[in-house]
Image (cartoon, rainbow, N blue to C red):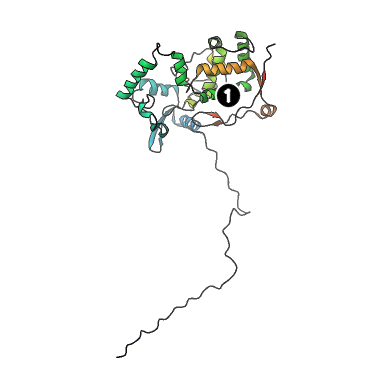
Amino acid sequence: MASRLPPPRRRLLLPQPPITSTPPPRPPTGPSPSSPPRQPPPPRRPSHRSLARLAQTHGPLISLRLGAVTTVVASSQEAAREFLQRHDAVFASRSVPDAVGDAHAKNSVVWLPNSPRWRALGKVMARDLLAPHQLDAPELQDLFAAGSDTSSNTVEWAMTELLQNPVSMSKVCNELERVIGSGKNIEESHISQLPYLQAVVKETFRLHAPAAFLLPRQDIWAMGRDANVWSEPEKFMPERFLEKVVDFKGGDFDLIPFGAGRRMVHMVLGSLLNQFKWKLPIDVERNGVDMTEKFGVTLIKAVPLCAIATPINLN
């Protein structure tokens, strides 16, 4: 019995493009000569300046949504007093950064929320660490409040301002020469006798706070430039503190520095001014000192200060 074979399949032939050796054109690698040049993006405004600008528009107390965290920023003396004095128990807790959350946040009186554990640790610290019979309280205060970075940054900003203000430089140098003697070492006991040097340090803290703002509460950079509190707020004028007593430790809301390092800054700055004569290089004096800030954990100069020091001849 014969079997039938299936009919042969028919192929559909489509026209093929002609084979050529010329490769396809490449996409353009840049703008054509006739297209306008691309403009670079505008420079980002530092965070502390952005917050100060927002405060000028919306008031000294603003709420910001930063990702998943709601942040309230106080940018004036009165707003800071509301947070830190009148309603301190409500706002005592703070958001713990990841950098310290895995390290010691659970055992730190700085980062723990207002809780029984926090109060218990506070009592232990007051009884065993801060008691006068245990340690010298001023030494411990400087240890907790000051760090080498914040102190050195403050000294650099102070020297920068003084080199641009010859009158203030002359006044502080004359005070050091009159009280201590030119070229001699400054001692801690001399600080209370140097009111103008103290005023220079306070004015430096006002204009160039070691930390631009104290998270999560205050923009202290904006507070130091509040025209409602300070006359001519952008001007370096130490004389404003000769008639106004301001506490470094946060008791006065006009000036809330971070990491004051009071004695360290006074002694280093006084030693530099009393043992050396200072001047700016010719090119820096001609073009001006770059006062650009670099925002970070501490507020530093983007371009380090360059100055010429000449030792004072004791003979």
Q: Which residue appears at 55% of the width and 16% of the height?
A: 267
Q: Is residue 65 left or right of residue 288?
A: left
Q: Which residue appears at 42% of the width and 23% of the height?
A: 80
Residue 45 locus on image (x, y percent): 52, 35
Q: Which residue appears at 34% of the width and 21% of the height?
A: 121
Q: How many marks?
A: 1
Q: Quadrant of the N terminus?
A: bottom left
Amino acid at dot 1: Glu
Quadrant in the picture for residue 24: bottom right
Residue 29 locus on image (x, y percent): 58, 55
Residue 59 locus on image (x, y percent): 44, 29
Helix, strand, or loop for circle 1? helix
Q: Label 1: which residue? A: 156
Q: Is residue 169 left or right of residue 130?
A: right
Q: Is residue 209 visible?
A: no
Q: Quadrant of the C terminus?
A: top right
Residue 44 locus on image (x, y percent): 52, 37
Residue toward you, 240 or 311:
311
Q: Is residue 285 visible?
A: yes
Q: Is residue 249 above or below residue 16?
A: above
Q: Is residue 120 left or right of residue 253?
A: left
Q: Residues within 10 Å of mark 1 (few under 14, many from 20)?
A: some
